Image: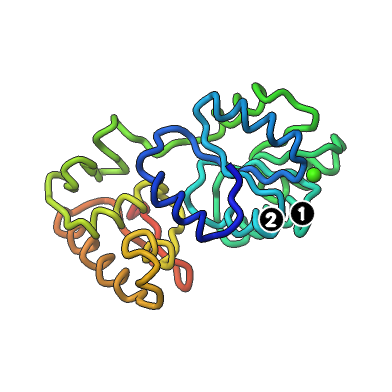
Amino acid sequence: MKLKKSKTYFKVFLRKMFYTKGMRILYVEDEQFLADAVIHVLEKSGISVDWVQDGVEGLELATKPIYDAIVLDIMLPGLSGLDILRDIRSRNIQTPVIMLSALSQVEDKIKGLNYGADDYLAKPFKTAELIARLRALVRRPPIADDKYMIFGDLSYNMEEHSLNGENLSQKESSILEALLKNPEHIISKEYLLTHVWGNEAKGEENYVEVYINHLRKILLNQNCKVKIKTIRNMGYKLCSKD
Ligand code: CA
């Protein structure tokens, strides 16, 4: 699936966020012929793919906390794959990244890994090889089964919207689910706002603060070993207290 605009992205995202059980990746590749072939095989393996051809668009999507992994070509129009990688790592976004390059030169590989790539695949590659590496890389949040999301001593029941047995409001649940989907990752306030309240809530970031505080009180009352940390000017992350 190719995503052109961020509006489309949000629609697709809101529809799929909690209904897609498989892996979801961002694929930034300008060569259509190659991309078509790779996407076909990935989707047949149950991996859902958001594909963009341009580096600038790639960076915009790569900053969103919704991907299990990012597959980045190096030579791209707009911004190179290495630029995208450097940018997201400098923002402390730790989504696993596999770099692709037609140049199987050692310097390229070293540069990519130095910038924080998790793996490197030289073109041409077999899609089966890419899938194997993606599976090896992606550490899914520990979900016990289809009903629970678990992190540290938090056990969230997705059907009953309850945290360690305590019922949550719909908005508290939506925020917690977004945090639990990517524990130890920064989730932006803007993202939470759009995710929970939709686009009409633009500029009302204090809604998020209010509900984050509700959730903090609940965690405190339950004496949880997990906290919601504020990352100044960036957002929040769910992390262990120690
Ligand atoms: Ca290219």
Please, which residue is most extreme toward the left here? 166
Name the image colouring: rainbow
In terms of image quadrants, where is residue 152? Answer: top left
x, y (%) of residue 95?
55, 47
Nearer-the-camera pick, 144 or 32: 32
Rate crowding at label 2 as few (under 14), some (14 to 19) or many (20 or more) other CA atoms within 10 Å. many
Q: Position of residue 116 (x, y in %)?
A: 66, 48
> 25 above or below 38?
below
Q: Determine whether label 2 and label 1 are within 8 Å by CB.
A: yes
Cα distance, mark 2 to mark 1?
6 Å
The x, y position of residue 120, in whole percent, is 72, 36
- Quadrant of the rendering where the N terminus is positioned: top right
Q: Amino acid at mark 2?
A: Ile
For disc 2, the marked residue is 84
Check disc 1 and give the amino acid type: Ser
Residue 88 coordinates in the image, percent (x, y): 61, 57
